[in-house]
Image (cartoon, grey):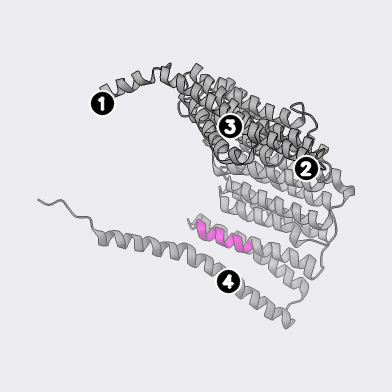
Amino acid sequence: MLPPQPNLRSGSRKEGADLEKKIGQYWLNRIGIVAMLIGVSYFLKYAFENNWIGPGGRIVIGLFAGIGLTLWSERFRARGYATFSYSLKAVGIGTLYLSLWGAFQVYHLIPSSAAFLAMVIVTASTIALSLSQDAELLASFALVGGFATPVLLSTGQNHEVVLFSYVGLLDVAILGMTVFKPWRRLLWGSFAGTIILYYGWYGDYYSQEQRALTVFFAALFAALFAVIPLATRHEGSTRFSGPSITLTLLPLLNAGAFFLALYAIYALETATLTWFALALAAFYLGISGAFKRRFPGQDTKFINLLHVAIAIAFITVAIPLKLDAQWITIGWLVESAVLLWISVRTQTDFLRYLAVAALTLGVVRLLLYDQFHTETLLFNARFATYSVAIAVLGGIAIFGKRHASEKEMVFIRAAVVALNFLDLIALTLEVSDYFDRQLAFSVSVAANYRQISLSRDFSYSAIWLIYGAILMAVGFRQRSAFVRWQSLILIAFTIGKVFFYDVSQLGGSYRIVSFIGLGAVLLGISFIYQRDWLKLSSRSSDKSAQGT
């Protein structure tokens, strides 16, 4: 007996019915609301143009219509038509806001203070309705209307204290709702509204005399959104339900927006910005600790590390603000070493990635950005900066072998390669600058200039060859094929320079010494391999035997 076949036609009918229901319940509902608003607007416009209704009557009609629609919507909600009820409320609440706007801005029937108070009452009433009816949609109406109020009632004058006090209270109200209701999406609207009003005001009205007050309000807004992870509702109110987009992205955007606001105010005062950056780092570290205490015994590691990362980012920003020239590079390099040490002590892998980022910043800046003017050999700012970078990489190479996992060993090897690379660059630059200083005093004598140039080119080969020999010795001593291969690559590069460059550019004595030195090193290394001190041939024999 064949198993019953799925009824594809039944499934398609069900999908079609769901789509039809969605169109009927939601799409047509919203289109109908828009059409009704447009129709009413045209009717009122026609009535106004023909002077059927005076200004006062128009406002009264709007207010009664808004209140009536809001009350009428409750009848539909009581009968189970919640979606339609909220749609009517949207029309009614919108009508109230527009009527109050018209009473003040269009007809000048009431002062701005009265219109503002009335809009605040409408917003507060909508918030109360949303809480009592457990309706996030109504809360979003209140949010939109609340942030639209200052725009609708704008007089073109600067009222910073009133504006930002109102915005702060509105943010507190929205945050308060998320304490009791899991309505995190409202926080995004509150954040966007705050940013828009702040930067809109700043672009039109900010002046130096208002700096202290502006910084206070900016800090207030930043603090309100920074405590969101501590204040917002989680599963069961006492359990952290895991990271969400709101708890992940919003703290990052909030921190960035606040620091941009500070930068716009203190653009030329780097010392002040540095203290702000360090204070913010301490603040976010405090938030991380408070969050962990708020939800003890629960998996809050991601949020904790996120706030630690924000703190470290502010420390990284503070370094170039406070320091200058090579001290920025040294600051980032030291920061990377500290982060690595903390990550090992606390067994926090996340901090290792931040340490790698800081180390990369330091090395890239050292190689591509920093400019040095040296007067002495070795004892100068450049060699000191390179020494710090080499020391950090050396610490990674030495201590990393003890604590790194097998997957992380590739980073330890990369650190060893980078260490040798920076060593060679530092030594080569020292030799180059030493001879450049000699050339500066010999430009008038062609013979001296030629002799110094030959000495410089020979010194390059000598340094690379000696360094390669030292690497090979270390590789033999530690029985490290990885180190020996680095030596072989460097020696191969030096061989190419001696045969293809030195033979044509260097004079007789330098050419002789270059080839004799190169030959001696190569013969010595060859002798060590022939003696098979590392028992490489026995390993090959063992592998061949295993293969057979």
Mark 2: which amino acid? Ala
Image position, residue 150 (x, y; %): 76, 57
The residue under the point 61% across, 39% down is 179
Q: Which residue is labeled 1 in the image?
A: 547
Q: Which residue type does callout 3 highlight?
A: Ala
Q: Earlier in the sequence, mark 3 or mark 1?
A: 3
Given contact means CB atoms under 8 Å apart, are the residues at marks 4 and 2 in contact?
no
Amino acid at circle 4: Met
Residue extending farthest front: 508
> In terms of secondary structure, where does tag 2 sit?
helix
* SS label for mark 4: helix
Q: Which residues are magenta?
A: 82-92
State the mark number for residue 36: 4
Above-or-below relation of 156 to 360: below
Alpha-carbon span between mark 3 and mark 4: 70 Å
Q: Which residue is at 80% across, 71% downward?
A: 107
- Left/right placement of residue 249 relative to residue 119 reads left
The residue that mark 2 highlights is: 446
Q: Is residue 370 visible?
A: yes
Asked whether 107 or 70 is in front, the reply is 107
Q: Residue 106, relative to residue 11: is it above or below?
A: below
* Mark with earlier residue (3, 2): 3
Q: Secondary structure at mark 3?
A: helix
